[in-house]
Image: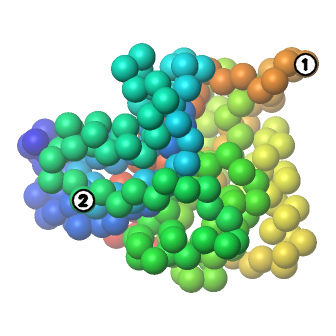
């Protein structure tokens, strides 16, 4: 099924992608599209992590959200979708919220890369700190709410982000915890839309963000970069 990709990257790199285990935590608008992009580009060993169920309000931005699966756990719905795309994929599901008490659930799976697309600040900080301590490759998605311009998305280091309140909070937490190390993130340098309402999302931004995250990991694998 990867013939067209093989034409441009070669069989050896397809086989390399097949063998890598990627963990995606957070299967919403960003993480769900990252996951789908990985599966459609040769990743055949995946760990998916999310405790949420699919809600009708997810339909504007989450690739998994359909009328037919409202109320299902996202991990269960994605398991079916993944196998419908490629039945060779090995799937490990963690249908739980991750915190200090169960963080080992992630690392017991021995992932080669982690894509952090979860929403909880404390969990994001914990994942970053543990990945740095354990020397596990990762990338973390920052705030995509109240953004409309996909051209302002960029992969950078957390210290270089701007107009990103989530990145600012996490940066302070890492500094307070005296964490040392490079923290690769996907962020938007667009100034947030000024609304007094709850945070809204625009699917071209969240979906593009997911593709950026997957592309980052895929390119790291096939280029064998450190």
- Does residue 128 appear anywhere in the picture? no
Give the label on residue 196, or none. Answer: 1
Earlier-in-chain disc, 1 versus 2: 2
Dot 1 crowding, Cα within 10 Å, few <14, some 14–19, many 20+ = few
Residue visible at 84% across and 78% down? 178
Tell me what residue is drawn at x 68 percent, y 46 percent: 119
The residue positioned 18% from the left and 57% from the top of the image is: 14
Residue 26 x, y percent position in the rendering? 55, 47
Q: Residue at x 46, y 40 (%)?
A: 73
Residue 139 visible in rendering: yes
* Residue 225 lies in quadrant: bottom left
* Coloring scheme used: rainbow
Q: Is residue 94 left or right of residue 84?
A: right
Is residue 127 found left or right of 11 in the rendered image?
Answer: right
Residue situated in front as seen by the camera: 27 or 215: 27
> Is residue 150 depicted above or below 184 in this figure?
above
In the structure shown, which secondary structural element does the residue marked by tag 2 occupy? strand
Q: Quadrant of residue 116?
A: bottom right
* 193 sits left or right of 34 in the view: right
The CA span between labels 1 and 2 is: 44 Å
> Is label 1 or label 2 in front?
2
Q: Position of residue 169 (x, y in %)?
A: 85, 53
Q: Which residue is mark 2?
A: 90
Vertical side of 55 occupied by 189: above or below:
below
* 68 vs 144: above or below: above
Q: Quadrant of the C terminus?
A: bottom left
């Amino acid at each position: 099924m990867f013939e067209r990709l093989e034409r441009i990257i070669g069989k050896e790199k397809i086989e390399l992608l097949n063998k890598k285990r990627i963990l995606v935590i957070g299967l919403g608008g960003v993480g769900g599209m990252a996951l789908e992009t990985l599966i459609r580009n040769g990743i055949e060993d995946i760990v998916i992590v999310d405790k949420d169920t699919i809600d009708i309000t997810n339909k504007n931005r989450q690739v998994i959200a359909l009328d037919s699966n409202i109320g299902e756990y996202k991990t269960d719905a994605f398991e079916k979708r993944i196998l419908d795309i490629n039945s060779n994929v090995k799937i490990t599901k963690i249908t739980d919220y991750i915190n200090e008490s169960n963080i080992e659930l992630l690392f017991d799976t021995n992932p080669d890369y982690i894509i952090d697309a979860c929403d909880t600040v404390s969990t994001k900080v914990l994942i970053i700190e543990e990945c740095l301590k354990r020397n596990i490759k990762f990338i973390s998605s920052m705030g995509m709410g109240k953004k409309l311009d996909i051209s302002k998305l960029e992969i950078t280091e957390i210290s270089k982000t701007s107009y990103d309140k989530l990145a600012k909070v996490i940066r302070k937490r890492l500094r307070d915890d005296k964490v040392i190390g490079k923290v690769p993130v996907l962020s938007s340098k667009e100034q947030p839309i000024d609304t007094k309402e709850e945070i809204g999302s625009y699917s071209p931004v969240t979906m593009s963000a997911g593709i950026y995250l997957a592309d980052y990991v895929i390119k790291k694998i096939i280029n064998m970069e450190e």
